[in-house]
Amino acid sequence: MEEVAYDSYMASPQGNETFQKIHENTFVEVANQPVSTFSVDVDRAAYSNIRRMISNGSLPPKDAVRIEEMINYFDYDYPAPSSQTRSPLQVSPEVSVAPWDSSHLLLRIGLQAKKIDLSKAPNSNIVFLIDVSGSMYDQNKLPLLKSSLKMLLGKLKAEDKVSIVTYASGTAVGLKPTSVREREQIEKVLDGLEASGGTSGSKGIQLAYKQAQEAFIKNGNNRIILATDGDFNIGINNPNDLKEFIEKQRESGIYLTVLGFGMGNYRDDMVETLANSGNGNYAYIDNIMEAKKVLINEFGGTLFTVAKDVKLQAEFNPKYVKSYKLIGYENRMLANEDFIDDKKDAGEIGSGHTITAIYEVIPSQGEIAQSLRYQTQQLNEKGKGNEMAFLKIRYKDPKEKGGQSVEVTEPLFYTPKEYTQATEDFRFAMSVAEFGLLLRESSDKGASSYEQVLELGKNAIGKDEEGYRKEFVRLVESAKLLSEQKMKKE
């Protein structure tokens, strides 16, 4: 992935919390750069973190607002890959007028990952890497962490094995690989954990990888689950150094799930670095219901990868697109040449996951801004019909170490509709994106308003069996009140 500097952080109003600086994507002229490339992101931590802050009575800092994670917190009813297709990913595109700017369009690229049969899933070798430092003492940290991991044990198979590694001022193997059928023994070790001392996170991570390698299951599901508030104060505590260490572990065949806990001293920047740099995913657990969502409802997606190093590249047709902007994914942008570089790391997608990316587009209305020889030639020779863009996806088989990427392609057609006529899922994703633009106070928010977000969201609730969309509407209502209070003070 593109090199990112971690020299700028944003403190949270909740205390000494830190976030990686986000430089918001801007509109790009198709005449100058018709191709956009990025790594997929199924991390969803930003939304639950923002929810925690708003619920506690304050608007989040701008750098806590990763819009793609907000959108992808919710599942969407996209068509699944058929049994006849070789790809584990099915594309679902849609085009609509942008609610916040009627002269712009939104191009949604939805992906649905195949679901694996968990009864036939390979056996798992899981290392619980648990932060037991003094900073984890609070009720919403170590106690919540224990309850979360106990829930996860209930989803694992009897043949699966679990190890426990802890770190504070030092590190220790709290439990050697133990069959899940010995659940009482595993829970006894969890119950005995207490928070105290410093945070030697880097040594803990090194020991966890060593433990996972010793118990490695060939063709199995080998994964470390790191549970922490990210406050590493002993050993490697600079995100750039930690990034370099984690990157070296990528080809081990061991995946990484990072669960963030707590507030006040929470290091979102550190935890995000861990998940993005390794073959991993990242969730923020602010309450027991979020633990249920991540570890029970989304168990397969959280623990079983179906495609790794997934990259998307969209080439825009100047006949229909004058300029474009990818909403979110700032920390996942790739250079165009990275798309075919199989050594370049990208995101992982789990069983059953849905992924949504939205481009905001300024239409060209049939006028090409510049007469570029090859672009025009391609348009004349290959631009038949009404192709708005051409999508390429590259991914690797997660069962193979290293390996070559598989590439699939799909044309995306220019079929715009009014946003009121868009599918329910697209309208809901629009409302979440607009909410993110407001929270970020984006210069491209156009005529966005909390009233419009609420109207869009309320009219796109759908089935919502777990109530996540209804909760979103309540969250927007709370943010609206906080925003009004902020405006009065100013």
Image: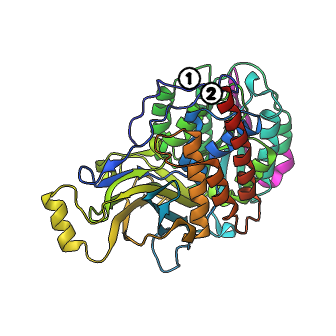
Task: Name which residue lies at 72% across and 53% down.
Answer: 473
What separation in Å lies between label 1 and label 2 (alpha carbons)? Answer: 8 Å
- Classify mark 2: residues with Cα within 10 Å, few (<14), some (14-19) or many (20+): many
Tell me if 470 is positioned left or right of 90 in this view. Answer: right
Task: Name which residue lies at 35% across and 53% down.
Answer: 36
**Amino acid on which the number 1 mark rests in the picture:** Asn
Closer to the camera in the image, 326 or 130: 326
Closer to the camera in the image, 451 or 222: 451
Residue behind mark 1: 237
Task: Name which residue lies at 45% across and 42% down.
Answer: 330
Q: Which mark is residue 73?
A: none
Q: Is residue 130 visible?
A: no
**Amino acid on which the number 2 mark rests in the picture:** Gly
Residue behind mark 2: 201
In percent of width and height, residue 77 lies at 61, 69
Residue 7 drawn above or below residue 407: above
User: Which mark's residue is nearer the viewer, 1 or 2?
Assistant: 1
Q: Report the magenta residues as a range.
A: 165-186
